[in-house]
Every structure is written in C-alpha cells, then in structure tokens.
Amino acid sequence: MKRTFLGFALVTAMAAVAQPPQCEYAFDNLRLSQTELRGTSRYMSMAGAFGALGGDLSAVNQNPGGIGVYRSSDIGITLSLDLNKTQTASIDEKKTKFNVNQFGYVGALKLDSETMPNFNWGVSYNRLMHFDRRYRGVGELGTSITNYLADKMMAKGIKSSDILIDNPIANSSADWNQVLAFNNYLVIPTNSDGSKFAGLGFQGVTAQGEYDMEERGHVDEFNINLGGNIANTLYWGVGFGITDILYEYNQYYGESLQNTEVYNKPDDPNATLVEGDLDLGFTNWSRTTGTGFNFKLGVILKPINELRFGLAFHTPTYYEMTDRFDQTLNTAIYPTNAAEYKLKDYTDTYRMDYDLRTPWRFIGSVAGVLGGKAILSADYEYVGTDNIRVKDDWEFRDHFTENKYTTQDVKDYLKGQHIIRLGGEYRINPSWSLRAGYSYQTTSTQDKVQNDEVDVNVCGISTAYTYDRKTQYITAGIGYRYKKFYLDMAYVHKYRLNNYHLFPGINDLPTVSDEVKDHNNRISATIGFRF
C-alpha cells in the first residue's frame, strides 16, 4: 500500500508535550517568563495602570519609585477567588481556585528635611502567575503523529541501528518519543539499511485523536523596596526580588487508526505487515522548579500636583532551574486475521539542571489628577521577550554554557511584547471610590510562526508547542476608607487566546492545531491599615 501524507488539517487538534534532555524549548521558557495582572484589589481594579501613581503595595513592585509617595505606613493582604473556564473547539473545562494574591508592609520614616521629607522601606509577597487550568480536545485527523515522528527521524539522519542498541533512551541520538514509537511499531523501516521510515497515517486510513492537558503551579515573588522623595517632586525607589517557580503538567495524547498497516505478531523477525487497527497513547509528566532574583529601578516625577510621569526598569530574573520529566507509550494492535497484542514502553524519570534568564522590562507611565476627585492613568510596558537565554548543564560539566540552539530559536520565533494599561478612579466622597480599567497584551510570537510559515524546532520528547496570540483584561472595583482602615474590592475578567500545536509542519506534513480560549473571572478583596 502506497503511503502518502494528507494535505489537510484536522477538524479539532490534539497535543503531547514534554521537556527534552537534549535542549531547552523556547516556548517552555516563554511560559515560565510570563506574568499576569495580579496584586492588590485597587491595583487590579485599575488594570495595573499605577506606574505614575504609586502609594500602593503592588504598585511599588511595578515602579519602585511609588514607595516614595507614601506619607504613612501601610499593611495589607489580598485574597481572591478565581473562576476559570478554558474552551477548545470541542470541550469546555472549569476550575475554581482560592488564592492569596498579595500581602505586604511599607514603613514610612519621616525626616526633618525639606530636601528629602521621608525615607520609606517595604517588604511584600506577590503572586505573579497562576498556571492552573485544564484543556482537552477530540476530533478527526488528516494525519498522524507517527508520520511526523518518521519524517523527523529521517530529517535527523536516524537509522534503525541507532535505536537497536543497549538503552537507546540514554545512548541514542534519537528523541525519546522516536525511540518509544519505534519500539511500539509505530514508525516502520522501509529500506534495507534502516535509514527510511514511514508512519501509519496514509491515504485510506481513518484516524481520530484526543488530547488532555492539565497544568498547575505558580510564580511567586518576595520583594524588598527602598525609596523616598526629593522636595515632594521626584520620587525614587529601588527593589530587590526573590522569585520562586513551580510548574507541573500531566498530558495525554491518543490516536485510534483504522485500516492501517500493522505487524501481525510482535517480536518476530518473520512478522509481516497486514491490514489492521491500532490505538496509541502517549502520557507525559513534567515538573519544573526554580528560584531566581531580579532588581528594579524607578522614579515618579510630579512637576505639578495635577500631572505625574513614571519610568521603571526591571532587570531579567536570573533563575536556577530543575526539570524532572518522563514519558510512557501504550499501544494496542489489532491485526486482521491475527491475535491482538499490547505493547508498553517508558522512560525513567530524568532530571536536568539549567539557568534561565527571563526578559527585561521597561515601563513608561503618565497620570492626571482632576479636581482632587478623579484619576486617569496610562502605562506602556515593553518586554524584551527575544532576550530570553538558557544555560545548560550539558554532559554534567562543572559549569553551565549557553544553549546556542535555544538562543537561535528564541531569535527566530519570538519578538518583543507590548502591554498597554489604562485605569481610572473617581472619589464619590472621602470614604467611597469607584474604579475601572483595561489592559491589552500583544503576542510574543513572530508572525511567521503564527502563519505556519516556519517549521518550529521541537526536541526531546516534545512534539507540541503553545503560544499566546493576545491577552486582555477588563476590570472594575470599589474602595472604602474609614480613618486608618481600608477595604478594596475588584473584579477582573481575563481573556486569553492560545494556539496549541500537536506538531510543527515538516516537509509536506501539515501542522495540527487547536485554539484554546481562557475566560477567567476573579473576585478579590484587600484589607489594610495605614498608620
């Protein structure tokens, strides 16, 4: 039977992702470098447009110059309830999560000086990113993952002899998923020297696929900030952050193929290819942990009481990271006129240590105070996403070296990100205030990747990649003040559109993708005292 690749994509797609032993994956590191709109309720209700305002426990970490605005000490905590809904073309998933978004303290020290009226310091905890979500998809396929693996093996120059060795997972140049697929008869040698391979999805084959991805984890930051003001006109601050990452996922990807070619018996040199059906299922697990540090600098200029400008710079966060991951493949084969049989292959749990440098950030802000009752504020943030770098502990060297492959992939696939934040507050009376805001984040992925004009490099046991196409926030809130006590409430709606690819295109093989949409609603409350 002649094998040909179908030139059409699926109705609904699927995926399988894992972390490779050979290299660090550009889109994995992009995910770990991202942040989202979280903080105090006042900060969130104005969409985080606080770069020129300050005087808020979260704003001082966005622009450290904001700590100089304080005239009194402040202590507060923020609790939130997250109602998350994730949609694919075929299945909706919902998750509810209670979080402690933030808590912090600012101490204000008054100085007997007109030049510098006060010097302030603060400590805080902030949740920068929350990964918890689940998404699934099912649908008819126009191709098979086995075709991709076969083509990738030929593109890399892999031969059967490279896998038919002792412990090929550790000693072969083939990727893990290629070794498992070869051992489960999912990629088949088609010439005498074992340098050509074919998958099982060809013309006349009926194929269905499904994927199930569950993510969990967080990025937390602990900050120390120092700052003050000069003549009540220039407010300055510096910050030091210690960051903690936990990211874990469990993934399943399965295919059912009917009327394909399978071996009529396992582990028999005289086995022949016959028509039949098969079911395959990849299960991937990965856990990433890391700690890092960064520095922040910022100033706020108030030339007149009604107008303020802010500038802030965040260095990259420098992480020490550890990944642990493994993969299992289960296959059930049903030959026509022969006994069915089942196969299973798996890897040990692998550990990899590496250093990660996240993007630097620049924030420019402006805010106006109108009649002592209203505030309008705007922020522009640039994130140097194409500046992500990784250093690997390859071959257990005594020092880490830059992964030039990931560096090139970052340059080829990613670009700088732009974030706009707009916020407003209206003081009804001395006790009550109303707030609203909007934020929009552009994608960090280059157009040629979004348009499937480039074969994205994936490696190790990963065949999939995912990226954000856009993210927006719509926010609102209310605040109450009574003497030293304050209570703020916020509502945040987050919409995020992802593209999720099972595998990139290679040669004439089409990409297979699914849209993943996040509709997340958050209700938060901040309780605090100023004294």
Image: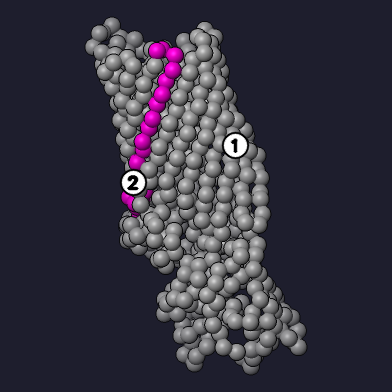
Q: Position of residue 177 (x, y in %)?
A: 53, 70
Q: Residue at x 40, y 37 (%)?
A: 420
Disc 1 secondary structure class: strand
Pick the residue in front: 86 or 340: 86
Count of labels in the image: 2
In the rendered image, the vertical position of residue 371 relative to residue 26, given as above or below: above
Residue assigned mark 2: 384
Q: CA distance from mark 1 to mark 2?
A: 28 Å
Q: Residue at x 40, y 40 (%)?
A: 419
In the rendered image, the vertical position of residue 269 relative to residue 156, given as above or below: below
- 138 horizontally vs 198: left or right: right
Residues drawn in magenta:
371-393
Q: Is residue 244 visible?
A: no
In the rendered image, the vertical position of residue 468 relative to residue 332, given as above or below: above
Q: Position of residue 365 (x, y in %)?
A: 34, 30
Residue assigned mark 1: 521
Amino acid carrying mark 1 in the image: Asn
